[in-house]
Image: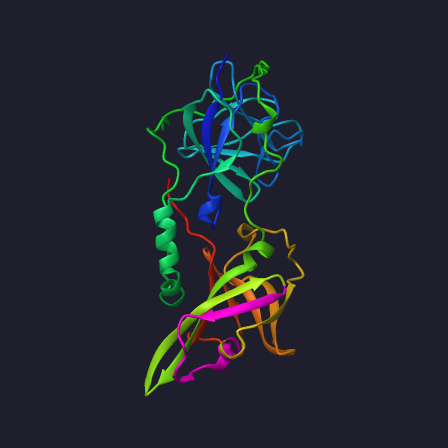
Amino acid sequence: MPKPLAICIENLNARSRASRYLRCVALPGRQPGLRLDKSGSVLWQREDVPACELWVSADERLMLYRQEGMVPVRLERAGRVLDAPFAKPVVLADQDQITIGRRRLRIHIHGEVSAVSPLAALPTSPRAVRRLAQAAATAVVVGTVMTVGGCKTASPTIDVTSTIEVLEAPPVIVTVEVTPDEIPTSTIDEPSISELIQGEWMAAQVYETGGEQAWYTGTLTIEGDTYTFKPFDEVVGTSVNDALDFLFANPSGEIAIDFASNLSTEDVLDDFNPGDVLATCVFHADGKASEEFEIRVRDGDNLEFYQWASEGWLWRIVKQVGGSAAP
C-alpha cells in the first residue's frame, strides 16, 4: 500500500508570512483528505465538493483530480500550461503551480511519511519574529520590510523537459486509517479584512522643536469599538501637521468602523490592490468625534490610514501584515 506524502502548499498571493506556507499530508486514494475549494483555500477531511483533490496514487505519485462540473483549475510547469480535465488524474511534480480563480499556489513535495498529521502553518523562526518586532517602529517611518525564510525542498525533483501527464484510468481507491484526534474541525486560511484591522498599528507624526523636526511614534491598538494609544516618548514641541494630535492628547476612546459597500468583513486582502479603500473610521474622545480617516491598502504588505485633507509625509498610521518570502 502506498504511504501518505508530506507536501507544503505555498500561497503565492499571500501578504502574510504566517499564511504563506501550509504543511499538509496527501492521503492514498480518493478518500476525503486534502482538497482545494473554488477559491483555492485548503480543506482537510471535509465532505464539501471541492474544486479539486490532491491524493497519492497506487504507484506512489501525487495526483490532482478535478471532479465533474467543478471550477477551472490550471496547472503550470516549466512554461507549460494545462487546464485540468474532468475526472482524469493529473500527475503533479515538485514546484508545480496551481491556479484557481485569483489564487496561485505552488506545490512542494517532501516525501513519504509514516504518520498522518493535520494542516499546520509553517512555523516562523522565533529569532526572526523578535527582529521583526524590534524593527517595527523604524519601519513605519522609513518603510523597511523584514522577511522570514519559508519552505525548503531538499532537492529539486522537477524535470524541465517533462510534459504534464494526464491519466485515462480511474484511480484505485485505497484507504489509510486516521485517528479522530488527528482530524481538525476547520480549515486554515488567511485572516479576514475585519481581523486585520483589529490589533496593533504603528502611528507616527512629525513635531518641531527649536527649529528641528523629529518623528514621535507610538502603538495604536484597536480592540472592537475602542482604541488605545501608547507613545514611545513624551512629545516635546508642536506638530507640523496636526492630524494625529488627538491621539497624543486623548490616548484612549472609541472608534466607529464602517466597511466599504463592496466589501464583506470576511474578504481577505488578496482580493484588493494598493489604494483600494477598505473602510472609513471615526475616532471619538471624551464623547466627541475627533477625526475621520479611510483605511486602505498601502501596498502588498501594508495597510494605512488616509485623509484627503491632510495628505502628506508628516504623519503615518500603518500596519504591516506580512512580507513575501521565497521557498
Magenta stretch containing residue 152, yes or no?
no
Q: Is residue 156 left or right of residue 67?
A: left
Outermost residue toward the bottom?
210
Residue 314 position, x and y percent, is: 42, 76
Relative height, residue 265 to residue 312 (above, below): above
User: In the rendered view of the protein, which quadrant contains the C terminus?
Assistant: top left
Which residue occupies 51% across, 11% down?
A: 1
Front-most of 207 and 277? Answer: 207
Quarter of image, res 187: top right
Relative height, residue 137 to residue 288 (above, below): above
Front-most of 25 and 80? Answer: 25
Q: Is residue 303 visible?
A: yes
Which residue occupies 37% across, 84% down?
A: 208
Start-end of magenta stretch: 225-247
Front-most of 238 and 240? Answer: 238
Give the tally of numbered discs.
0
Magenta stretch containing residue 226, yes or no?
yes
Q: Is residue 297 left or right of residue 38?
A: left
Which residue occupies 50% across, 41% down?
A: 104
Residue 183 position, x and y percent, is: 59, 29
Q: Is residue 146 visible?
A: no
Relative height, residue 120 to residue 170 (above, below): below
Which residue occupies 44% across, 69% down?
A: 218
Residue 253 position, x and y percent, is: 59, 72
**In this figure, which colouring scheme has been used for the structure?**
rainbow
Residue 19 position, x and y percent, is: 49, 44
Outermost residue toward the top?
1
